[in-house]
C-alpha cells in the first residue's frame, strides 16, 4: 500500500494537470472550438482557473473548472460541514458538458479533495451521464468503463458508488433520476480500504477517463439527424438538469451559501433550457421510453 505522505502542492498540481488533460482532449473531440480561460483569485486565499468552451461543433457549452481555495473556516462552512478545525484547503476539478445534438448526452464529473489543519481529510467525486434519450447499450458501455476503473482500487467501489449515485442524482419532486447515473462518492479516506495516495490516483484516473467515455458516446454517431421536436425535448431535459442543480445539488448550494464564485458555480447550467406546462409524451414514443427509464437501481451491466 502506498504511503499517505502527500503534500498539498502535489495534490493541487496533479489536479491541475487533469484539467489540462481533459481540456485538450475535449478540444480534439469537438474539432472546432477552444476553451477560454478565466483566472480568478479569492480574497481569503487561493483561486482557480475556469475554462469555458462555447458553440463548438459538438459541444454547445462546456465548462472545466479547477480551484484550490484555503483560509479560515467561516461560521457558515462550519454549520454546513460540521468541521473540527480553524483552517481548510479545498481543491478539485469539475466538469459539465452540454452538447448541441439531442442524441448526445450531458455528462458531469467532479473530483475533489478537502483537508483541515487538524490533519483530517477526505476525497469525493464521480462521473454521471444524463442522456436526453436513453440508449441502454451506450449506458452499459459507460458503466462498464466506470466499473473497470473502480475495480483497480477496490471491488466494492463500483456497486457502492453506483448505488450512491442513484440516490444522489435523483429529483424527488419529479420522482425521477437525473439520468442513467454513474458513480458518486464523498468523504472517502484510508478507512475505506485504500491509502491516501491511492485515493488521489483514483481521482486522477477518473479525470482521465472522462474524455474517453464522453468520446465513446459522441463517436458512435457524431451527427445524428434530429427534428425541432427533438430539440424541444432536449431543452425540457435540460430544464430538469437545472432543477436538480439549483434545488438539490449539495455542491451548488454549498458554494452559493459560502460566498463561492458565482460564475464558476453556475457554469454547470446550459445555454438554453425550457419548461413546458404539464408535458405528456406521446404513448410509445422515445420520449416516453426515456421517462420510464429514469428510475433508481437499473443494472446496466
Image (spheres, rainbow, N blue to C red):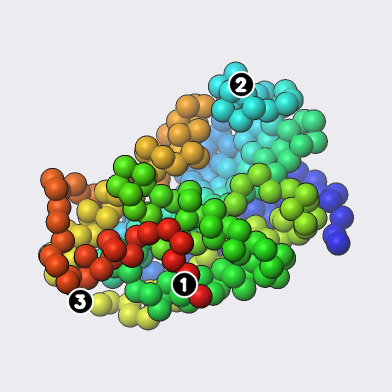
- Quarter occupied by the N terminus: bottom right
Q: Quadrant of residue 30?
A: bottom left
Dot 2 falls on a residue whose secondary structure is loop
- Which mark, by number, is residue 74? 2
Tell me if residue 81 comes above or below residue 213 in the rendering: above
- Proximity of marks 2 and 3: CB atoms separated by less than 8 Å: no
Dot 1 falls on a residue whose secondary structure is loop
Q: Nearer the viewer, residue 99 or 252?
A: 252
As measured in the structure, the alpha-carbon distance from the residue carrying label 1 to the one carrying label 3 is 26 Å
Q: Of tags 2 and 1, which is closer to the observer?
A: 1
Is residue 183 among the parts visible in the rendering?
no
| In this rendering, position of residue 83 left or right of residue 55 | right
Tell me if residue 184 comes above or below residue 50 in the rendering: below
> Circle 1 is placed at which residue position?
300
As measured in the structure, the alpha-carbon distance from the residue carrying label 2 to the one carrying label 3 is 51 Å
Q: Residue at x 34, y 53 (%)?
A: 176
Q: Where does residue 199 sit, x and y in percent of width and height?
A: 72, 56
Q: Quadrant of residue 207?
A: bottom right
Local packing at callout 3 (Cα closer than 10 Å; few below 14, some 14-19, many 20+) is few
Q: Where does residue 141 sit, x and y in percent of width and height?
A: 48, 76
Q: Earlier in the sequence, mark 2 or mark 1?
A: 2
Q: Where does residue 229 sit, x and y in percent of width and height?
A: 13, 64
| In this rendering, position of residue 154 left or right of residue 43 | right
Q: Nearer the viewer, residue 151 or 95?
A: 151
Amino acid at each position: 500500500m502506498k504511503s499517505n505522505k502527500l503534500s498539498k502542492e502535489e495534490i493541487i498540481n496533479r489536479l491541475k494537470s487533469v484539467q489540462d488533460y481533459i481540456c485538450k482532449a475535449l478540444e480534439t473531440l469537438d474539432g472546432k472550438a477552444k476553451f477560454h480561460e478565466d483566472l480568478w483569485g479569492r480574497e481569503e486565499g487561493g483561486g482557480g482557473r475556469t475554462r469555458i468552451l462555447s458553440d463548438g461543433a459538438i459541444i454547445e457549452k462546456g465548462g472545466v473548472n479547477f480551484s484550490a481555495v484555503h483560509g479560515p473556516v467561516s461560521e457558515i462552512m462550519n454549520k454546513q460541514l460540521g468541521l473540527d478545525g480553524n483552517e481548510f484547503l479545498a481543491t478539485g476539478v469539475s466538469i459539465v458538458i452540454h452538447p448541441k445534438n439531442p442524441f448526445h448526452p450531458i455528462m458531469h464529473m467532479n473530483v475533489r479533495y478537502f483537508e483541515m489543519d487538524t490533519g483530517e481529510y477526505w476525497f469525493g467525486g464521480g462521473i454521471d451521464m444524463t442522456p436526453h434519450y436513453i440508449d441502454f447499450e451506450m449506458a452499459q458501455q459507460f458503466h462498464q468503463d466506470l466499473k473497470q476503473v473502480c475495480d483497480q482500487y477496490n471491488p466494492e467501489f463500483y456497486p457502492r458508488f453506483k448505488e450512491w449515485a442513484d440516490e444522489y442524482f435523483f429529483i424527488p419532486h419529479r420522482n425521477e433520476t437525473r439520468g442513467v447515473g454513474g458513480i458518486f462518492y464523498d468523504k472517502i479516506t484510508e478507512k475505506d480500504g485504500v491509502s491516501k495516495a491511492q485515493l488521489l490516483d483514483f481521482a486522477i484516473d477518473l479525470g482521465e477517463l472522462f474524455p474517453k467515455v464522453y468520446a465513446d458516446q459522441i463517436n458512435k454517431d457524431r451527427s445524428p439527424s434530429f427534428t425541432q421536436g427533438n430539440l424541444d425535448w432536449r431543452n425540457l431535459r435540460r430544464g430538469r438538469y437545472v432543477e436538480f442543480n439549483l434545488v438539490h445539488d449539495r455542491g451548488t448550494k454549498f458554494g452559493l451559501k459560502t460566498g463561492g464564485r458565482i460564475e464558476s458555480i453556475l457554469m454547470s447550467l446550459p445555454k438554453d433550457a425550457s419548461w413546458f406546462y404539464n408535458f405528456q409524451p406521446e404513448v410509445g414514443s422515445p420520449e416516453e421510453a426515456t421517462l420510464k427509464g429514469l428510475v433508481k437501481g437499473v443494472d446496466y451491466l
